[in-house]
Image: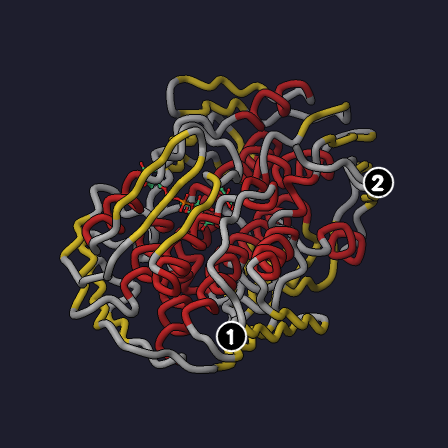
Amino acid sequence: MTEKNNYDTIKVIGGKKLNGEVKVASSKNSTVALIPATLLSGEEVILENLPNISDATVQLELLEELGCTVERDDACVKINTKEIKSKPLVGENVTKLRASYYYIGALLTRFKEVEILMPGGCYLGPRPIDLHIKGFEKLGAKVDISQGLVKVKAEKLKGSNIYLDIASVGATINIMLAAVMAEGRTVIENAAKEPEIIDVANLINSMGGKVRGAGTSKIKIDGVTKLGSTRHEIIPDRIEAGTYLIYAAALAEEIKITNIIPMHLESLISKLEEMGVNLEVYKDSILVKESKNLKQINIRTAVYPGFPTDLQQIMVPLLTTKANGVSIITETIYSSRFKNCHELNKMGANIRVENNSAIIVAPKQLYGTLVDAPDLRGGASLILAGLLAEGETTINNVEHIYRGYGDIIEKLTALGATITKA
Ligand SMILES: CC(=O)N[C@H]1[C@@H](OP(=O)(O)OP(=O)(O)OC[C@H]2O[C@@H](n3ccc(=O)[nH]c3=O)[C@H](O)[C@@H]2O)O[C@H](CO)[C@@H](O)[C@@H]1O
Ligand SMILES: C=C(OP(=O)(O)O)C(=O)O
């Protein structure tokens, strides 16, 4: 159960245009993998540009539970994993986020045995970890899961050819973590290609590992016997960047979004352009100007470089309020990622969810009311709805939002929004 604090509610007063500049933080999905990856080295590792999100804090607390030294100075964290001993991870921190599963791969490399609770994270439909398990077993580990506890043990880890039935981000990274010191070569076929996978491979290689092909569907890992210390700068968060791009498409007079790698956002940029959003793409920033007469579009989520599932929920209030005509979003990654639509309908939207599609009738005016953030991106979707709505919107369960959006209240306030923690 997540502890309640004073900041469990966000209040938004809608109807204001936004202006100014917003800087994107480092990637959540990289950070939450890079932190456990520091366990692969017994020496000091420094991560730079740590995002101010609760998922990063929880991952660092898990390192501390294992006995690591963690010195955090603003956005830089110095981690020393030298003195740690193998220990079960069975506290509530493990269940606060999805990425605690990366402790399985990392601890398997370090100690050849792991005992950990099943991960948490946003409920978006069933999220099994069978492909992770299949990978560990192919490397020679024995896995036992009962009553929510995962036990993994190996006499020794041996490189293998592993084909993933689904190009899973989590399984690709977790198998990489487990294979770094396995004897011989591991090949992951049908690997996920998300930029965060390249970021993790870069960290491993800068510690002395041998990972080739990250970012393609075939990753080759040659086992090494030792990894050393390094300093690593985390890549910008393409999902946070995409979120602010969508907010700007809906609300900007003129908004510049900085610290972006535009190549990571091609599918979103192309969909916003198809709608008629007025944007200028630069080397590491995007300028969005006031956009009028936006067209309806259809979106189908897909693995990278397709349209990210993590951004579809945020598109819904934009399409509801600004598109002319009916838009359809089809979700292909998760079976239950439309809970935000139910909340948006309470605000005046007309969205019908049929199987894995949301049919969005537009344009509709939204009205402020009391809503519940169903999950992280669903929460970000409701913030945008609140900013677009007439009157005041109160959003409950906002701890989901702080998992992935650092300083979101401050960033939106600086753009001119009326938004407060309550
Ligand atoms: C911490 C992190 O990086 N989270 C991201 C990661 O989640 P996560 O790593 O959980 O997502 P996956 O890519 O593994 O999941 C994709 C699909 O494969 C299924 N699956 C996955 C693993 C498995 O062993 N068996 C299985 O059936 C999942 O249920 C899902 O339907 O990638 C997702 C897809 O881009 C993003 O939405 C999440 O933000
Ligand atoms: C689904 C997400 O996160 P997680 O996998 O950490 O639950 C997300 O970032 O949108």
Q: Is residue 103 left or right of residue 393?
A: left
Residue 179's quadrant in the figure?
bottom left
Q: Position of residue 214 (x, y in %)?
A: 29, 66
Q: Nearer the viewer, mark 1 or mark 2?
A: 1
Label 1, residues with CA under 10 Å away: few <14, some 14-19, many ≥20: some
21 lies above or below 370: below
Instruction: Pick the residue in front: 275 or 103.
Output: 103
Residue 82 disc label: 1
**Residue named by callout 2:** 6
Task: Give the residue type that dot 1 points to.
Answer: Lys
316 lies above or below 262: above
Q: Position of residue 274 (x, y in %)?
A: 43, 46
Q: Are marks 1 and 2 in contact (CB under 8 Å)?
A: no
Mark 2: C-beta under 8 Å from nearest atom of ligand 2: no
Asked if residue 9 shows in the view, the reply is yes
Residue 171 disc label: none
